[in-house]
Image: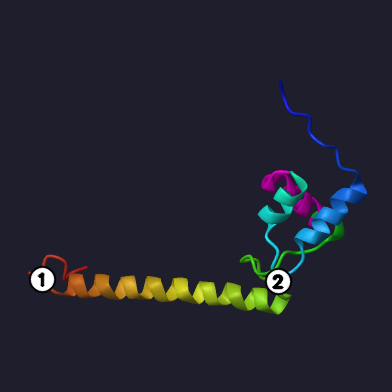
């Protein structure tokens, strides 16, 4: 026979989510405390962030201004151009050496 799951009201969910956002508190610990799965609590947290327009920080997601985004884009283009330049330099050195097969190119 399957186990009956406890139904949480919106207020209860909100309280649980708020407790999970406390510093030095693990999601798994809060979930165990209330008898819910860690995945369920993570889903509730994600829904809370979406509803309130909260962007998670410290999880590899960096909030950037338009200027920072443009600088990052230009730095990426620069790295790609430098890589292409280095490849072309190596190709030139390979074709300029050797037995003369490719020296007319």
> In the image, which disc is placed on residue 33?
none
Q: Residue at coordinates 69% horizontally, 79% vertically from top-left?
A: 67
Q: How is the image coloured?
A: rainbow
Q: Residue at coordinates 90% horizontally, 44% vertically from top-left?
A: 9
Between 89 and 58, the residue placed more toward the observer is: 58
On the question of residue 42 being in view, the answer is no
The residue labelled by disc 1 is 98
Q: Quadrant of residue 4?
A: top right
Residue density around tag 1, few if under 14, some if 14–19, many if 20 or more, within 10 Å: few
Q: In this view, which residue lies farthest toward the left? A: 99
Q: Is residue 52 shown above or below 32?
A: below
Instruction: Name the element at disc 2.
Output: loop
Between 37 and 95, the residue placed more toward the observer is: 37
Q: Position of residue 56 (x, y in %)?
A: 72, 64
Given contact means CB atoms under 8 Å apart, are the residues at marks 1 and 2 in contact? no
Q: Residue at coordinates 80% horizontally, 56% vertically from top-left?
A: 17
Q: Label 1, label 2: how many angstroms apart (C-alpha)?
A: 52 Å
Instruction: Name the element at disc 1.
Output: loop
Q: Is residue 19 left or right of residue 96?
A: right
On the question of residue 47 being in view, the answer is yes
- Count all numbered tags in the image, as a single digit: 2
What stretch of residues is rendered in magenta? 36-49
Q: Residue at coordinates 26% horizontally, 73% vertically from top-left?
A: 90
Q: Quadrant of residue 57?
A: bottom right
Q: Look at the image and say whether residue 92 sits in the magenta stretch.
A: no
The residue labelled by disc 2 is 63
Q: Quadrant of the N terminus?
A: top right
């Amino acid at each position: 026979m399957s186990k009956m799951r406890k139904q949480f009201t919106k207020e209860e969910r909100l309280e649980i989510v708020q407790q999970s956002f406390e510093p030095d508190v693990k999601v798994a610990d809060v979930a165990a405390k209330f008898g819910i799965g860690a995945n369920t609590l993570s889903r509730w947290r994600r829904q809370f962030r979406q509803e309130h327009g909260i962007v998670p920080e410290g999880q590899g997601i960096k909030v950037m201004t338009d200027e920072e985004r443009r600088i990052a884009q230009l730095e990426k283009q620069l790295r790609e151009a430098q890589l292409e330049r280095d490849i072309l330099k190596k190709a030139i050195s390979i074709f300029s050496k050797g037995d003369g097969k490719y020296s007319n190119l």
